Image (spheres, rainbow, N blue to C red):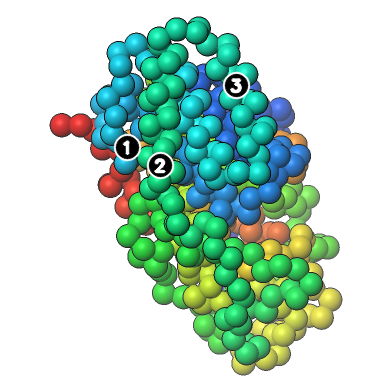
Amino acid sequence: MKRPLLAVSATLLAIGTTAPFGGLSVTPAAAVPATPVAHWSLEAQRAIVPPPSGRGNTFPGEAAVYMGIIHVALHDVAVAIQGGYRPYAIAVTAPPDASAGAAIATAAHGVLVALLPTQRGDLDSRYAEYVSKLPDNASRTNGIAVGEHVAAGIVALRANDGRNADPEYVQQPPPGPGVFEPDSTKPVLGLRLSRIRPLALDSPWQFRPHGPTPVTSREYAGDFEEVRRLGRFDSPARTGEQTTDALFWTDHDLRQWNEGMLRLAAERGLDFVQTARMLALAHVSGGDAMIACFDAKYHYMFWRPAVAILRADTDANPATEPDATWRPLRATPNFPEYPSAHACHSSALVEALGTFFGTGDVHLSLASDATRTTREYIRLHDVVKDVEQARVLVGFHFRNSDLEGSILGRKVARFVMGRFSRPRG
């Protein structure tokens, strides 16, 4: 069962080399403007994301939750200073002269040191340097007070939320057809995600999908054949462009998305509160999508293509054949396959952005350190199509898991957009 690749629109911007799906490959990406919200959003990103683009070591799924927590603080500061929207959680009336830069910096710093206490010395230095450049007056003092109030409220709200839990991996089912089998030489990842209290959802399992395609089904056989043929490390069926597409999305997608959204805010001319609001809506959607995704992953415990293809003789499906030499293009992440986390996260962000702007026809540039290229999109949904295809091409996922992950991400974002950051009135 074959699915056609997404065709490139003839209206794509004529820059660089055309990529085979929704974007164009160019380099380098445009710089992110240094507004207070952008500056501290980047500081948060770099504190969370691992080298070479950051200095953190947070697992990508948890990183999305951390970014959500930080950005609701920035949102509530912006609303306190400029008004117009209901706060996420912390209502405070800012003095008319409160410095937005001091308030944003103080809130971000306060939340970051609570989330990442081992980086406190570095974060303290960065905060002190930033604030020292602001005029030393009542405006700065009042801004600091607003930021401290919001940070303390958000930190208290997220106390004992499961972020620091250390769950043991004790739920492994007996080996068999369709059953995830972790790599015993590496730590199993993402265990605590499904135990983290969501930022907006009522529960991690609120939108739990129905489960992976049965391994005996015709649809599974079609997805099996697609990833077997295209996701193999040395696949002769995968073109050079498709290999680049697969590798583009092996970068840390939190960095890709956050920097892309900051460029988008500048391009759209968003003001202080709208920039903070857009980022918070997107990151809360993305963080809760990751929580929901890993709830489903560890509920269904579905096997990865690397094991499924090796043991196809056990799946009772006459349309699948084992291949003892098969390996994915890149090493498979050590957590269950269904649904695709990248699809969950990207589709949640796309849905949030489309709702925020009132249209999916939004120009967005995303860059990859893995390929040193940047893609320009003119339709947000094309990003999701790229991700769905790329996770097959890299050998990580069956197509159905990408599609189901995208559906889950959209459901989460729609819920978040209906609950959070509504206009006052």
Q: Secondary structure at mark 1?
A: loop
From the viewer's perspective, tell me whether residue 396 is left or right of residue 418. right
Task: Name the residue located 65 percent from the left edge and 26 percent from the top edge.
Answer: 125
Task: Name the residue located 47 percent from the left edge and 19 percent from the top edge.
Answer: 102
Q: Residues within 10 Å of mark 3 (few under 14, many from 20)?
A: some
Q: Which residue is mark 1?
A: 90
Q: Which residue is mark 2?
A: 154
Q: Which residue is mark 3?
A: 128
Q: On the image, which quarter does residue 22 sit in?
A: top right
Disc 1 from disc 2: Cα separation: 7 Å
Disc 1 marks which amino acid? Ile
| In this view, the mark in front (1 or 3) | 3
The quarter in which the N terminus is drawn is bottom right
- In the picture shown, does residue 220 fall above or below 386? below
Pointer 1 and pointer 3: residues touching (CB < 8 Å)?
no
Q: Secondary structure at mark 2?
A: helix
- In the picture shown, does residue 208 fall above or below 302? above
From the viewer's perspective, tell me whether residue 402 is left or right of residue 209. right
Question: Can you see residue 201?
Answer: yes
Question: Can you see residue 248?
Answer: no
Task: Name the residue located 79 percent from the left edge and 72 percent from the top edge.
Answer: 185
* Nearer-N-terminus badge (1/3): 1
* Nearer-N-terminus badge (2/3): 3
From the viewer's perspective, tell me whether residue 10 is left or right of residue 187. left
